[in-house]
Structures are given as C-alpha cells and as structure tokens.
Image (cartoon, grey):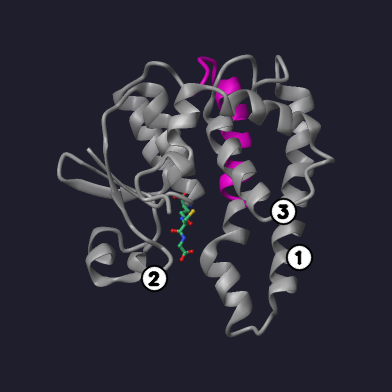
Amino acid sequence: MKLYTYFRSSAAYRVRIALELKGIPCEPVAVDLRPGAHRQADYLALNPQGLVPALEDGGAVFGQSLAIIEYLEEIHPQPPLLPRGALDRARVRSLALAIACDIHPLNNLRVLNHLRAPLGHDQAAVDAWYRHWIAEGFRALEAEAGRCSGDGRHLFGAGVTLADVCLVPQMFNARRFHCDLAPFPTLRAICAHLEGMPAFARAAPGAQPDAV
Ligand SMILES: N[C@@H](CCC(=O)N[C@@H](CS)C(=O)NCC(=O)O)C(=O)O
C-alpha cells in the first residue's frame, strides 16, 4: 500500500492518522504541492483530481481522504473509527463532513491561489477569508461538541472516531493561519488530548519524512 501525501496536507494528515490508529503499514510517497507536483502529468495520470492524498492498493489508485479512510475501515475494522449504531455512525459522519466538505474546501491551496490571482486579492484579504471560514465552521463544531462529546476529549462520545481524525488536521491548519481560537475551548481541549496520543503524533506534519 502506498499513500501519496504531502506533510502539510490536512486531507493527507487525516489518512495518516487512520493508518497509524489501525497499525496499517503504508509507504509514503511525497507529492510536493509547493512547486505544483500534484498538477504534473505523472501525478495526474495516477489521480486526475490533482489533489493529495491518493491511496494505491492492489494496483488501484484513488483519491478523497474520506473514501480512503472508509476503505481502510472496511478492510481493517479494528480499532473502529465509526460507532456501531446507524444513528451514531450518521452523527460521526455529519461531524466529519462538516469539516471535510464545509470548512476545508473553502480554504484549500487552489482556492487561496485563485483569490490572489486572477481575482487580485492581497494577502490580508486572503487571510481574512481563511479566518472567516474557520470561525464560521468552528462556531458550529464547538456547539456540536457540546452536544456530542462524551468526555470533552473526543468530538463524539468517549473514543476516537472519524470526527476526531478530521478535527485535528483542521485545528493544525487554523493554528498555522493564526486564527482566533479563543471562542472554541472545547475543540482546543479535544485536540490537546488527541495530539498527545502516539498515533496522532506520528501522523503529524512535523513528523513526516518530507517535512521541511
Ligand atoms: N476532498 C479532498 C480534498 C483533497 C485536497 O484538497 N487536498 C489538498 C491538500 S490538503 C490539495 O491537494 N490541494 C492542492 C491544491 O489546492 O492545489 C479529500 O478529502 O481528499
């Protein structure tokens, strides 16, 4: 199994956490987003979406971090990242999708680049855009955490789920862009707990071989 990854990619970070939690051996293949390696023909031949991560297994390559994580969950169910009951599974997916579909895509590299050129926004405007969508998304998640967290250390219930796997990388990005996190004490406490777990620490951007 190979993971096409970039150390600072939060979508790849989600998959790295899932691999570490499940103890699945996987060879990382670095795709450097800075010079645009993900837009080069050799990578587009593997993943026409031109985004990281992508997973290669059994001769097939596919992208989309949540599809990859659900695949890992199916082929390697232990430890589970989704709870047993249908309702709880839907609630965990709802939290994960709030991050992966409603926060992350608005602040992706290609979106920020498009704001700069051709739309002509300066760095201050791009930063304001970034922070606005983090604040909007985290406001909802903080409220969700109040209803869903069972122990103040996990976004849902009292064990690690797919929701946590998505939250920690998004928090990493929010810190990197100096977002105001004061209004989100529950999310900060959850991430502080999770980031102390060895699997999360091994998956962190700074621990990756391509981190520079
Ligand atoms: N929905 C996709 C998003 C993947 C994605 O946007 N990856 C980012 C890095 S976190 C990327 O490759 N960005 C390149 C770009 O925006 O040009 C997933 O969950 O895998």
Q: Nearer the viewer, residue 146 or 200?
A: 200
Locate residue 193, reporting x and y percent.
Answer: 63, 23
Answer few, some or many: residues within 10 Å of disc 3's Cα (few below 14, many 20 plus, some between 14 and 19).
few
| Magenta region, residue range | 82-103
**In which image quadrant can residue 80 be found?**
top left
Task: Check residue 128 in the rendering and tell me which mark sits there, or answer none.
Answer: 1
Alpha carbons under labels 2 and 3: distance apart? 24 Å
User: Of 54 and 200, which appears nearest the observer?
Assistant: 200
Does the rendering let one see residue 155?
A: no
Closer to viewer: mark 1 or mark 2 = 2
**Mark 1 or mark 2, which has the lower sequence index?**
2
**Which residue is farthest right?**
183
Query: Which amino acid type is marked by label 3?
Result: His
The question of residue 206 being in magenta is answered with no
Query: In the drawing, does residue 112 fall left or right of residue 54?
Result: right
Residue at 73% over, 37% down = 141
Cβ–Cβ under 8 Å for marks 3 and 1? no
Q: Which residue is mark 3?
A: 178
Compared to 36, does 131 lie above or below?
above
Q: Is mark 1 within 8 Å of ligand 1?
A: no
